[in-house]
Image (spheres, grey):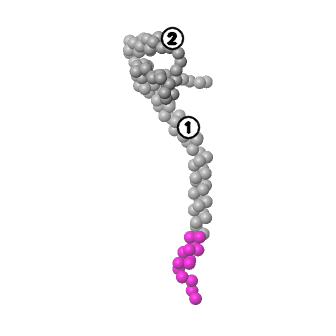
Amino acid sequence: MRETPKRKRTKRWGLWLPLILAAFLIFGGAGVFFYPAVSNFIADQSHREIITTHANLISNLDPEILEQEWQEAEIYNESLMGDPVHDPFVPGSGYAIPDNYAQTLDLDEVMCTLEIP
């Protein structure tokens, strides 16, 4: 008797299945291996864009407005003097972030940039 076409298809599928699984494992492993490098690259690009935008905003800002913002920051810092250090992010600590914290030096949601050599 002759073999039915179903058996041939089953045999062909049996040959392709290990190759498909191996390809998925290889690509999955490569994805896991390269994920940190790719995510760091994307984060660095985003940070560069934010820093460039902030630097352009500050350099084009009117010196009077910049001085006014500086004075507001000084006033805010003086309001904190004598207050013990608390962690406002600990739930139930009894200390809340001051209302004017977000407005202090908040020209474009960036307060400063920090460069570590």
The residue at 57%/49% (across/down) is: 31
Which quadrant would residue 16 be assigned to in this image? bottom right
Q: Secondary structure at mark 2?
A: loop
Total numbered circles = 2
* Residue 51 part of the magenta-drawn span: no
Label number found at residue 40: 1
Can residue 113 be seen here? The reply is no
Front tag of 1 and 2: 2
Report x, y in % for residue 81. 50, 11
Question: In screen coordinates, is 15 left or right of 71?
Answer: right
Q: Residue furthest bottom?
A: 1
| Front-most of residues 92 and 67 | 92
Q: How far apart are labels 1 and 2 at the CA level? A: 40 Å
Give the quarter of the figure containing the C terminus.
top right
Stretch of the chain drawn in magenta: 1-14
What's the residue type where badge 1 is placed? Asn
- The image shows residue 13, relative to residue 93, as above or below, that is below
Which quadrant would residue 106 be assigned to in this image? top left
